Amino acid sequence: MCAMYNNKSAVFMANALIGCNKCSICNGYLHKDGMNFDHVIRKREGGGSEISNLQLTHPYCNTGIKS
């Protein structure tokens, strides 16, 4: 009986993770309180704030890895 609940939990988690946001730089899962909006083409390089030029990233990935 315990295995049945483990299987149900595993199926639930697998399906729940499908819809989660991921960092565009490292592909890790994002927490709702730990994400940045990043410009694909940097503002200083002429990139604007239109939807097509924005992506979700971890704060570290945006400021540490990308810079």
Image: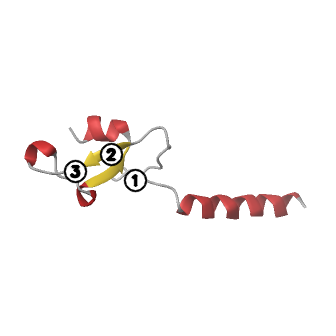
Disc 1 vs disc 3: which is toward the camera? 3
Q: Of helix, strand and loop, which one carries label 3?
A: loop
Q: Residue at x 83, y 64 (%)?
A: 4
Q: Amino acid at mark 3?
A: Ser
Q: How is the image coloured?
A: secondary structure
Rounded to the nearest whole Å, what is the CA distance between mark 3 and mark 2? 10 Å
Disc 2 vs disc 1: which is toward the camera? 2
Q: Which residue is mark 1?
A: 27
Pointer 3: residues within 10 angstroms few (<14), some, or many (20+)? Answer: some
- Is 59 in front, or is 8? 59
Q: Of helix, strand and loop, which one carries label 2?
A: strand
Q: Position of residue 49 (x, y in %)?
A: 22, 50
Q: Amino acid at mark 2?
A: Phe
Disc 3 vs disc 2: which is toward the camera? 3
In the rendered image, the residue lying farthest to the right is 1
- Residue 37's disc is 2
> Which comes sooner in the sequence, label 1 or label 3?
1
Q: Residue at x 46, y 54 (%)?
A: 21
The quarter holding residue 53 reads bottom left
The reply, left or right, for residue 63 in relation to residue 29 is left
Q: Position of residue 30 (x, y in %)?
A: 46, 47
Q: Amino acid at mark 1?
A: Asn
Q: Residue at x 34, y 36 (%)?
A: 60
> Which comes sooner in the sequence, label 3 or label 2?
2
Q: Position of residue 43 (x, y in %)?
A: 14, 45
User: Mark 1 near mark 3, Cβ–Cβ under 8 Å?
Assistant: no
Q: Residue at x 48, y 38 (%)?
A: 33
Rounded to the nearest whole Å, what is the CA distance between mark 1 and mark 3? 22 Å
Relative to 63, say whether 42 is above or below.
Answer: below
- Residue 49's disc is 3
In the rendered image, the residue lying farthest to the left is 45
